[in-house]
Image (cartoon, rainbow, N blue to C red):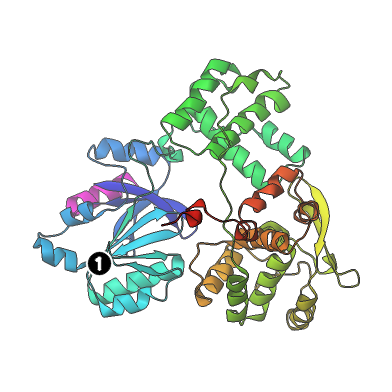
Amino acid sequence: MHYYDKIHRGEKRLFIKFPFDKSISEKLKKIADCKWSQTEKAWHVEASHAVFVKLQKAYPELQPLNPSAEANAQAKPALSQEKAQKLTVKVVQYKTGRYRVIAFYHPLLVSMLRTFPFAKYDKGEKWWSVAIEEKQKKELEDFCTTERMELVWEDDRVKKGVKPKPRVYEIPNYRTCPDIMLEKLEIMRYSASTIKVYKQSFEEFINYYNTKKIDDITEPEIIAYTRYLVQERGISASSQNQAINAIKFYYEKVKGGARKFYQLERPLKETKLPTVLSVEEVQAMIKSTKNLKHKTMIMLCYSAGLRLGELLNLKPNDIDSDRMQISIKGAKGKKDRYTLLAEKLLPLLRDYYKKYGPKEYLFEGETGGQYSERSMQTVVKEALQRGNVKKYATVHTLRHSFATHLLENGTDLRYIQNLLGHSSSKTTEVYTHVTSKALSGLKSPLDNLDI
């Protein structure tokens, strides 16, 4: 028997999978209020610690695994290995938003996969690499149901030997972030996204020591916890820094303690060069986008170097066509700034305003209110696919491309720093490492050899 959790109809549920056995089903119904999911082909119950404890007692063999090919193979009558493979479509998630689809050749399946975002076939490995969201998931499920094939989902993101983050329902007497900390974060005007990260990080910390009072946790125990995050949980350097910042905020800002936790072992900051689209690739994205709203959002994001949140927070009166500027208010670090308004964008903005008549936000959803982050991310993904852009890019890639293209056109780095809203010039200097013009005049020493 296997269990896994996922959001089902807006609520986190615990799914139980096992080979068909009427006695197990009847017993399960007595333990908890369970329901059957035709999509998941599994029973699901409330994802609470109390229910989880009952399940563990009733079924000692219950394992915390996602549905896998092995589990499904046990759940069905034995087939020959070759026939079982031909009747199976395996979908393996190997990083956020990216999946490998492994299956024997089927013309209808191939035709469908070609329509998925970022679809690419690996001839050597004989699998498709695609992006999958709810729409694509539903298409795969419908296909397998029609063709009477087994759809198997696997998660290959978890590193071997690395512990996953404990689930809320697995922790007895789960403790939530103290209200006093959340109130302090709000009073100090931390952004909603920062508050969310601090809350999650601090809750994992206090539940790691769930038998101790929060104020009794010692400095050596805090250091031991950060080592656990790196050595056993395998978190990234940025996630480790976030955890440390959340812990420090509570003991120093909320409790008014001395800065005695500065001796925590901070990870070295990872230096990664940003992905940058070429001018031709940005042009292909824009030209292939016919929807007026989507085209306006992509062009505005690129032409002004906006972050995703800055784009979605824009109000109609933030566009100053007289001064050819865009006002960005309360951006990262609670800073205001002005950035460029492109002349080529003005006619498009006017057409957009006439058609959609935005009220509160410049870009609003179908039912009003702020346009969602997920929707904008999808807009960019689809534009990349239509424009036949092969690079993995996001909304933020448009901002990187804006800065790099300005630098390649001879714009002073200090002006780019102001347009992007960077506090330090060192942050902006990363674009000097990705500009192609900086390398165009250089010659490899190999070219000087007489060979």
Q: Characterize the magenta stretch by its predominant secondary structure.
A: helix
Residue depicted at x 76% and y 83%: 351
For this view, does 313 lie left or right of residue 140?
right
Q: Which residue is mark 1?
A: 103
Of residue 237 and residue 275, the one placed in the foreground of this image is 275
- In the rendered image, residue 430, in percent from the top left (x then y), is placed at 65, 49
Residue depicted at x 78% and y 72%: 342
Of residue 266 and residue 169, the one placed in the foreground of this image is 266
Tell me which corner region of the image, top left, top right, bottom left or bottom right, holds residue 277: bottom right
Above or below residue 289? Residue 265 is above
Residue depicted at x 76% and y 76%: 345
Tell me which corner region of the image, top left, top right, bottom left or bottom right, holds residue 408: bottom right
Of residue 287 and residue 186, the one placed in the foreground of this image is 287
User: Which segment did they paint magenta?
Assistant: 19-32
Q: Amino acid at mark 1?
A: Ala
Image quarter hosting the C terminus:
bottom left
Of residue 23 and residue 14, the one placed in the foreground of this image is 14
- In the rendered image, residue 240, in percent from the top left (x then y), is placed at 54, 34
Magenta region includes residue 109: no
Above or below residue 355? Residue 244 is above
Q: Secondary structure at mark 1?
A: loop
Magenta region includes residue 22: yes
Tell me which corner region of the image, top left, top right, bottom left or bottom right, holds residue 278: bottom right
Q: Using the rendered image of the protein, determine whether residue 210 is visible from the camera's viewpoint.
A: no
Residue depicted at x 56% and y 36%: 201
Above or below residue 140? Residue 437 is above
What crowding class fits label 1: few (fewer than 14 Cα within 10 Å), some (14-19), or many (20 or more)?
Answer: some
- In the rendered image, residue 105, in percent from the top left (x then y), is placed at 23, 73
